[in-house]
Image (tube, grey):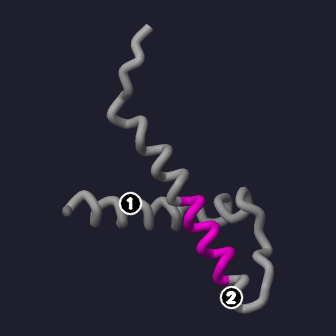
Amino acid sequence: MSHSHSKYSWRPRKFRAFVTNEYYANRDEYHQVGQQQPYTFEEYVSNNINDLRKKFKKIKKEVDKH
C-alpha cells in the first residue's frame, strides 16, 4: 500500500476551509446588524454552492498568478 499523496488531495481541504470561512464571515455580517444567521452550515452551503465554487475558483486563479 502506497502512502504517496495525489497532487489533487489538497483541493477538497482548501475548498472546505474556504467554505467554512465564508460561512463564518456571513454569520458575522448578520451579528454585526444584530441578527442571527437564519441558516445552518449545511443550508448555507446547499443554498450557495454554485456561488461558492465560482468565488473559490476566482480567488484560486488570482493566487496562482502570483
Residue beneath the point at 36% across and 65% down: 59
Q: Nearer the viewer, mark 2 or mark 1?
A: 2
Q: Is residue 64 above or below residue 9?
A: below
Location of the C terminus (image quadrant)? bottom left
> What residue span does the magenta drawing correspond to?
19-29
> Hey, what amino acid is under mark 1?
Lys
> Hey, what amino acid is under mark 2?
Gln
Disc 1 designates what residue? 57
Q: Is residue 7 above or below residue 23?
A: above
Q: Is residue 25 magenta?
A: yes
Q: Position of residue 20 (x, y in %)?
A: 59, 59
Disc 2 designates what residue? 32
Residue beneath the point at 68% across and 74% down: 27
Q: Is residue 46 magenta?
A: no
Q: Residues within 10 Å of mark 1 (few under 14, many from 20)?
A: few
Q: Residues within 10 Å of mark 2 (few under 14, many from 20)?
A: few
The dominant secondary structure in magenta is: helix
